[in-house]
């Protein structure tokens, strides 16, 4: 039973990683850093928009408003994911 659950977790993790690779981040002209829109960030982190706003206020995510929508720095999202996996 334990081996079956571990296999399921492994397959789900692989599926999530494949989904993340399909997201199309935006690179601002003249910059090497990539920005990801709010909808894709919510999908990647499996969090609501209010939770993302709280993480920005707490300094856990870096966000910038481009037009009317918030965009999130890809490196801050990846650091947040790594940090949450360690806990």
Image (tube, helix red, strand yellow):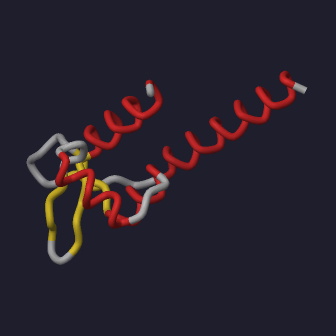
Residue lying at 23% horizontally and 72% vertically, measured from the top left: 69
Residue lying at 45% horizontally and 53% vertically, measured from the top left: 23
Q: Is residue 4 left or right of residue 79?
A: right
Q: Is residue 69 left or right of residue 17?
A: left
Looking at the picture, tell me which residue is in the foreground, 35 or 80.
Answer: 80
Where is residue 61? Give x, y as percent. Answer: 24, 46
Looking at the picture, tell me which residue is in the foreground, 59 or 66.
Answer: 59
Compared to 31, does 6 lie above or below? above
Look at the image and tell me in which quarter the C terminus lies.
Answer: top left
Compared to 31, does 53 lie above or below? below
Where is residue 33? Give x, y as percent. Answer: 19, 42
Q: Residue furthest right?
A: 1
> How many labels were placed on the picture?
0
Q: Is residue 18 left or right of residue 66?
A: right
Residue lying at 26% horizontally and 40% vertically, measured from the top left: 76
Where is residue 39? Give x, y as percent. Answer: 40, 66
Where is residue 28? Give x, y as percent. Answer: 16, 54
Q: Residue furthest left?
A: 30
Residue lying at 14% horizontally and 59% vertically, measured from the top left: 64
Look at the image and tell me in which quarter the N terminus lies.
Answer: top right
């Amino acid at each position: 039973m334990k081996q079956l659950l571990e296999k399921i977790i492994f397959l789900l993790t692989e599926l999530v990683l494949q989904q993340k690779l399909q997201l199309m981040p935006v690179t601002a002209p003249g910059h090497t850093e990539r920005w990801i829109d709010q909808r894709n960030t919510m999908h990647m982190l499996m969090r609501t928009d209010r939770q993302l706003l709280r993480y920005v206020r707490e300094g856990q995510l870096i966000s910038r408003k481009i037009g009317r929508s918030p965009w999130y720095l890809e490196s801050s999202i990846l650091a947040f994911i790594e940090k949450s996996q360690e806990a």
